[in-house]
Amino acid sequence: MEGSLLELGEPIGDAISRIRFAPRSNNLLISSWDSVLRLYDVDGSERRLEAPSEAALLDCCFQDEKSALSAGSDGCIRRYNLCSGAQDVVGKHDDSAICIEYSEETGLDKTLMFWDMHMENANIGYTRKGDSDIWSMSLCGFYLLAAVGIAVKVYDLRNLKGPVLSKESSVDFHVKCVRSFSSNQGYAVGSIDGCVALKYFDPPKECEMGCVFRCHPKSKNGRYHLVAVNDIGFHPRYDTFVTGDDDGYAIIWDAQSRKKVFELQRYPSSVASLSYNYSGQFLAVASSYTFQEANEVEEAPHVYLHKLDNFARPSSSDKI
C-alpha cells in the first residue's frame, strides 16, 4: 500500500519537526526547521497557508480549526490565524521550546510554562522548573504527560502545583516520545533503542495489559540494529497504533496482541512524525532527517498520505 506524496508547492527547506491533523477536519499542519509553518488541505489537495517566522519551528499544534501554535528554537510560542496568516508571540522561554500542546478542556497551551489562552494577553499562569530536560509531551484529558529521561511525569492541568504522578516507563533507555491513548486510559512511550511500552493508569488494567516490547529491531550484518522510535500514533476509533523509526519504517500494530498488522513502505528518510486524521481514515507520515545520527542522509523532506480503511479493526471494550 503505497502512500501518495503531498504536493506542498515550494519544497520544504529543512527537516520536518511535526505534522498534525486538525481536530475536526482534514487540514494538516506542518512545522519545520526552515522556520515556516504550513497548512495543507488534504480534501482539496492544496496548500492553504505558508507562514514564515524568525526561528526554526520545533513543534506545532492546533488551538482550533482557525488557529494554531508553534514552539521555536528562539524560545517563542507563536499563535497563528490560519485564515489570514497573521501571527503573534504568546510568550517566551529562556531557551528553545521543543514541545507544545493545547488543552481544549482548560484553554492552556503547555510547554511546562502554562499560558491561559482565554486571557486577552495570554498571561502566563504557572512555570515548572525541572531538573531534567523534557523531550516529549502529550495531553491525556485533564492531564499532561511529560517524558523525562526514562520516566513519565503526570501533571493535573486543574491544579498546577507540580506532578501528581511520576512513573517509570519500563524501558531501559531514554524516552523519545510519549503519546496518549485515544481513550485517555493510558499512554505509550517509544525509546531510543526501539522499544515501546504500553502503560495504563488503572492498576488492575496495568497489571493485566501493561507491557513493553521491541518493535523496531533491524538485522544488519547478522546482528540486531536497534533504532529510535520517533513517534507513535493511535487510531481514534480502533485499537491499533502506528510507530515510526529512524530507519524510515512505519509499522501498524494490534494493541491487544502487540502483533504487527502491516508494515508500510520504507521511506527515503527517518519517519520524523505521524498523524491520524480525526476519523482515522487517513494517516500522514513525515519522511525527514532528524539530526540524530552523524551519517544520516539528508534527503529532501516529504509528507506521504495513506488511506487505511483496511488496516484497522473494530475496538473491543479494552479500546486504547
Image (cartoon, helix red, strand yellow):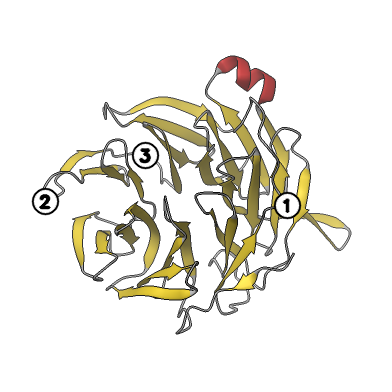
Counting residues from the start of the chain, the first of labels 1 and 3 encountered is 3
Residue in the foreground of this view, choosing between 275 and 189: 275
Q: Position of residue 126 (x, y in %)?
A: 21, 37
Residue that badge 3 annotates:
131
Picture quarter containing residue 219?
A: bottom right
Q: Residue furthest bottom?
A: 10
Residue 160: quadrant of the picture: top left
Closer to the chain start, of discs 3 and 2, is: 2
Q: Quadrant of the C terminus?
A: top right
Q: Nearer the viewer, mark 1 or mark 3?
A: 1
Q: Residue sitting at 42 percent across and 51 percent down?
A: 24
Front: mark 3 or 2: 2
Tag 2 or tag 1, which sits nearer the N-term? 2
In the rendered image of this protein, does residue 90 appear above or below residue 234?
below
Identify the residue position indicated by label 1 in the image.
310
Near mark 1 (Cα within 10 A), the count class, few <14, some 14-19 or many ≥20, is few
In front: label 1 or label 2: 1
Confirm or deny contact between disc 1 and disc 3 (CB under 8 A): no
SS state under label 3: loop
Compute the Cα span from label 3 to label 2: 29 Å
Question: Which labelled disc corresponds to residue 121?
Answer: 2
Residue under the point 64% across and 45% down: 241
